Amino acid sequence: MQEFEQLKQLVDAAESDVAKAEGGNKAAGVRVRKQMQDIKAAAQNVRSKVLELRDSGD
């Protein structure tokens, strides 16, 4: 499922900034918050796609 792969890529991309933010880097914290918004939207896309798959199977 393409939507899920995109979600995984977004999480992987955020990993280094999360580590930097834990170290006190404020700019990295801003980037992480932006990336979390993108991850939230991607997760919603996955949810929608799963519902489409479920409904089309009936």
Image (cartoon, rainbow, N blue to C red):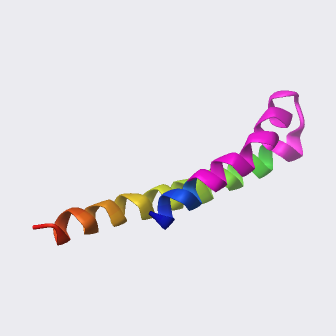
Nearer the observer, 52 or 32: 52
Picture residue at 9% right of the left edge, 67% below the top:
58
* Above or below for 30 versus 49: above
Q: Residue furthest left?
A: 58
44 on left or right of 25: left
Quadrant where the N terminus is found in the figure: bottom left
Callout count:
0
Q: x and y percent of residue 13 in the render?
A: 73, 51
Q: Residue furthest top?
A: 23
Q: Nearer the viewer, residue 8 or 33?
A: 8
Q: Residue 8: where, in percent of width, then height?
A: 59, 51
Q: In the image, which residues are magenta?
A: 8-28
Which quarter of the picture shows residue 45?
A: bottom left
**Nearest the camera: 41 or 30?**
41
| In magenta segment, residue 41 | no
Q: Main secondary structure of the magenta part?
A: helix
Q: Is 30 left, or right, of 5 in this rendering?
A: right
Compared to residue 18, the image places residue 45 above or below, namely below
Above or below for 39 versus 48: above
Figure quadrant of residue 20: top right
Residue at image position (42%, 60%) is 46
Place residue 18 in its image quadrant.
top right
Residue 2 rendering spot, x and y as whole percentages: 50, 66
The stretch drawn in magenta includes residue 9: yes
At a point 78% along the width and 51% down the height, the residue shown is 31
Residue in the image at 49% along x and 64% along y? 3
In the rendering, at what x and y percent does residue 47 appear?
36, 58
